[in-house]
Image (cartoon, rainbow, N blue to C red):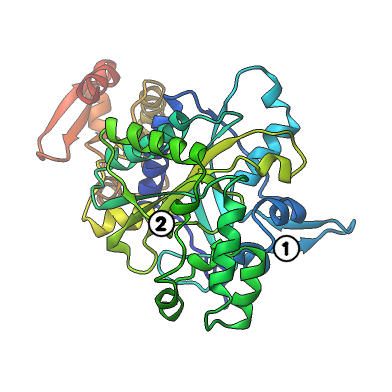
Amino acid sequence: MNTFQAPKGTYDLLPPDSAVYLAVREAISAPLRNSGYGYIETPGFENVELFARGVGESTDIVTKEMYTLTTKGGSELALRPEGTASVLRAALEANLHKAGNLPVKLWYSGSYYRYERPQKGRYRHFSQVGAEAIGAEDPALDAELIILADQAYRSLGLTGFRILLNSLGDKECRPVYREALQTFLRDLDLDDETRRRIEINPLRVLDDKRRDVQRQLTDAPKLRDYLCDACRVYHAEVRDLLTAAGVAYEDDERLVRGLDYYTRTTFEFVHDGLGAQSAVGGGGRYDGLSEMIGGPELPSVGWALGVDRTVLALEAEGITLQLPPATSVFAVPLGDEARRLLFGVVTELRRAGIAADFSFGAKGLKGAMKNANRSGARFTVVLGERDLAEGVAQVKDMESGEQKPIPLAALVTDLTAKLT
């Protein structure tokens, strides 16, 4: 009999591994929640044009990687390949920027989709946690977001990551650099597709990972030499704030990221233990994106961190997260009356905040105790006919193996005291 399988390039999250992903999401979002960022959730699909305008028509994401579909009504939609454009669209649609409290600080968590060649660390369906600060141009905001991401990673115990930092200039100085870069690139030995990219977005060529291309870029003009005074001062302030906060970074003149909307500050978190897919997250400032998608001028900055790659980074460093047990108490009833009574005990324990489970189905003592062992519970409660007659339940400490009777009337209180 044939069974269905997950589509190529995707994965299922299953217990117990899924608990690690939940813990990573919690760790990444915790510093954001403590810093004034409110949660936002957007649809899994959007109008194709939102990404074409926002992400960039010349990007691989738009030209090669988006999953698109046509609705019965003829609308062109795309599964979201990234989060920023969707979050900004939602903020504009809800007029959050008109509430008078700028920047609008939002964080999100969800699944994203890109049609790519599947490999370890690169999937067609992947999970990210992201943050956006909309409506303020302030180097302290850029620094804040980088510091919060650094804090999140360190709270997980990660130490093997590096922060790469660059400035892409703004609408005043970048066109001058763009022209100089185009002049340089046109003289190189490049394929037709890359030559087309030179005319649309030459900075993307700097992001080309092919060795034969990188060799030819050795003498490419440096963007730092073309920064206007305002961008130079802005970038220096971001760097000074990071240094003052004790957050180490590396200047990377080639860092442009894969999206067209970035301006000024751009950064990437990389982990050298992940091989080719070393980027675990990144982001930057996107001061012109709001206008690109039909909104007012709203300078903004944000990032997205990959949950999948963060988990791989934990594995690369041999870090095992200390996760709360899925079950603390496992109840094993023997007989109908014991079953009714222990089910009530389990319900009371759960209401008290204790993770408790129950031996469901008509299992004997041996089978039920196997389930108790598999559950990882700290205590197993066994209640049989003799115990009922004596008004006690047998409570076994699964770590020490010690077992003793506890009066039924004190059972919930006793277990709660032991576990809190």
Q: What is the x, y in percent for residue 220?
A: 45, 67
Secondary structure under badge 1? strand
* Above or below: residue 283 compared with residue 415: below
Q: Label 2 belongs to which residue?
A: 253
Q: On the rendered structure, is 107 left or right of 402?
A: right
Q: Is residue 135 left or right of residue 45?
A: left
Residue drawn at (36%, 35%) of the image: 147
Q: Quick one: label 1, few (<14), some, or many (20+) residues within 10 Å? A: some
The quarter of the picture where the C terminus appears is: top left
Residue name at image x 48 percent, y 23 percent: 36
Q: Relative to the observer, which residue lies in front, 178 or 287?
A: 178
Q: Is residue 244 visible?
A: yes
Residue 394 falls in which quadrant of the image?
top left
Q: Is residue 36 left or right of residue 194?
A: left
Total numbered labels placed on residues in the image: 2
Residue 324, percent across and down? 29, 37
Residue at position x 55%, y 61% in the image: 203
**The N terminus - image quarter:** bottom right
Q: Which residue is mark 1?
A: 68
Callout 2: helix, strand or loop? loop
> In this rendering, would 140 be left or right of 177?
left
> Tags 1 and 2 in contact by the CB under 8 Å rule?
no
Q: Amino acid at mark 2?
A: Glu
Q: Earlier in the sequence, mark 1 or mark 2?
A: 1
Picture coordinates of residue 370, whole percent (x, y): 26, 51
Establish if 23 lies above or below 207: above
| Front residue of this view, candidates 51 and 70 | 51
Question: In the image, which is nearer the foreground, mark 1 or mark 2?
Answer: 2
